[in-house]
Image (spheres, helix red, strand yellow):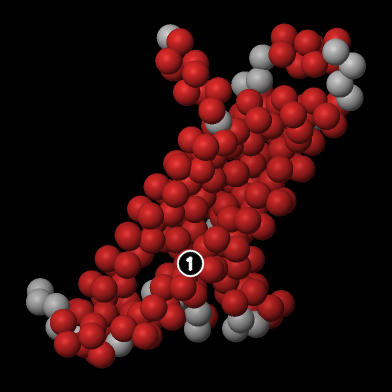
């Protein structure tokens, strides 16, 4: 299976536009997923009766085939980028919600009690103690959700969006492998670069984990 390099050279601008569109859809979905999952995770962590309900609901949503989610959203948001982002956000929730809950659960009770003994209010304890200590687990979820979203954007090509997924459709319809290969390579590169950047961000945001390793 050969690659037509002249086709790539002739479509550089189009490939750049599709790549940026693909990345924008994925990152928007992850950001919205975080904004939704963080308060829900805190609620699930604090109110144990809601924990099973929220996690169970996110799992149910995750079992719906991605193309079916996009189709079900069409009457609401139409053939727009909004449909793509909503569908992707739904899929990120199950990972982000569960990891955030597990991260909060991993914070030692003694640490929270010490913060309370020092006069810290619940909200301050959450923001300055619990969330920072839960960050490594939360970031693991963000990395998974980001890679997953980058992969799933291509499915939206069936509703007229899909970023780099349009290259797959174009290549298959014309029996021309070059767009398919380019689409796969660019999608993989996006996922690898995004994951590497998130690892770096976690490294910067959690300096205490490095001190713990050095002292071990």
Q: Position of residue 115 (x, y in %)?
A: 80, 16
The quarter of the picture where the C terminus appears is top left
Pick whichever, 46 or 205, lies toward us: 205
Which residue: 45% across, 61% down?
150
Q: Is residue 16 left or right of residue 44?
A: left
Task: Report the front residue among 92 and 26.
Answer: 26
Q: Quadrant of the N terminus?
A: bottom left
Point 30% across, 87% down: residue: 11
Say which residue appears at 31% left-offset and 83% top-offset: 12
Place of residue 26 in the rendered image (x, y in percent of width and height, measured from the top left): 52, 63
Is residue 69 visible in the rendered image? The answer is no
Kindly indicate the quadrant of the structure image that contains residue 47. Answer: top right
Residue 171 in which image quadrant:
bottom left
Residue at the spot x=15%, y=83% of the render?
A: 4
Judging depth in this view, the residue of 83 and 22 nearest the camera is 22
Q: Which residue is mark 1?
A: 23
Rendering coords of residue 102 (x, y %): 61, 29
Q: Few, some or many C-alpha atoms within 10 Å of disc 1 (few <14, some 14-19, many ≥20)?
A: many
Secondary structure, mark 1, is: helix
Position of residue 160 measured from the top left corner of the image (x, y, whole percent): 50, 83
Direction left: furthest residue: 2
């Amino acid at each position: 299976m050969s690659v037509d390099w002249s086709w790539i050279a002739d479509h550089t601008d189009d490939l750049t536009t599709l790549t940026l569109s693909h990345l924008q859809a994925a990152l928007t979905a992850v950001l919205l997923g975080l904004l939704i999952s963080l308060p829900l995770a805190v609620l699930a962590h604090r109110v144990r009766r809601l924990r099973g309900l929220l996690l169970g609901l996110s799992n149910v949503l995750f079992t719906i085939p991605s193309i079916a989610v996009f189709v079900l959203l069409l009457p609401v948001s139409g053939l727009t980028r909004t449909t793509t982002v909503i569908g992707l956000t739904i899929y990120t929730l199950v990972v982000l919600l569960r990891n955030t809950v597990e991260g909060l659960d991993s914070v030692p009770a003694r640490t929270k009690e010490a913060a309370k003994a020092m006069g810290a209010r619940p909200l301050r304890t959450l923001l300055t103690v619990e969330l920072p200590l839960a960050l490594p687990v939360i970031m693991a979820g963000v990395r998974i959700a980001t890679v997953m979203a980058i992969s799933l954007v291509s499915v939206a090509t069936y509703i007229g969006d899909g970023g780099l997924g349009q290259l797959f459709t174009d290549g298959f319809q014309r029996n021309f492998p070059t767009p398919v290969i380019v689409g796969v390579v660019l999608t993989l590169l996006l996922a690898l670069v995004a994951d590497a950047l998130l690892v770096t961000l976690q490294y910067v945001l959690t300096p205490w984990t490095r001190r713990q390793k050095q002292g071990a």
